[in-house]
Image: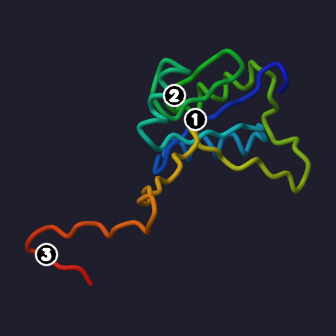
Amino acid sequence: MQRYPVTFYTTSPCAPCDAGRTLLRQRGVPIAEITVQSNDDIAELQRREGSIDLPMLRLGAQRITGFDGTDWQATLDAAGYPRTSKLPAGYRAAPARPMTAPAAPTVPASRPGGPALPEPVPPGSFRF
């Protein structure tokens, strides 16, 4: 595990991502799961990995794109991961984290010396 740490890039909804996650859990492979949801995430994945094909399994320096159970099994075998989980009972994987930090919400600036003015109402409409 220390020589070949596993990073698993996913998106949602994604049936191949779900199948890959299931395989990794059945084998007891501890993973760092990173979700790719926004255009910023896609750009960052392209920058980091040179590909945007998902799911993507990063096993040490090796990268596998797309899900092929046979290929994933062989790669995990070659890296020395056990065929069945050896993790302690009650082990909980870390929650998936986003590829990039969510953008901070923008707050409209208030007018100096007074409260913010209401948004203008387009002609032909009305506000409640």
Q: Which mark is in front, 3 or 1?
A: 3
Q: Is residue 101 left or right of residue 51?
A: right
| Residue 28: quarter of image | top right
The quadrant of the image that shows the C terminus is bottom left
* Residue at the disc numbered 1: 9
* Residue at the disc numbered 2: 45
Nearest to the observer: residue 99 or residue 14: 99
Q: Which mark is in front, 1 or 2?
A: 2
| Residue 63: quarter of image | top right
**Label 1 to label 2, Cα distance in Å?**
9 Å
As helix, strand or loop, the secondary structure at mark 1 comes to strand
Nearest to the observer: residue 30 or residue 82: 30
Residue 26: % across, % down: 73, 45
* Residue at the disc numbered 3: 125
Residue at point 67%, 31% (across, down):
7
Residue at point 51%, 26% (across, down):
65
Extreme residue toward the top, this view: 61
Q: Is residue 103 left or right of residue 29?
A: left
The relative height of residue 43 versus residue 97 in the rendered view (above or below) is above
- Of pointers 3 and 1, the one earlier in the residue sequence: 1
The quadrant of the image that shows the N terminus is top right
Q: Which mark is in front, 2 or 3?
A: 3
Image disc number at residue 109: none
Q: Is residue 80 left or right of residue 12?
A: right
Dot 3 surroundings within 10 Å: few (below 14), some, or many (20 or more)? few
- Tell me the kind of residue under disc 2: Leu
Residue 66: % across, % down: 49, 30
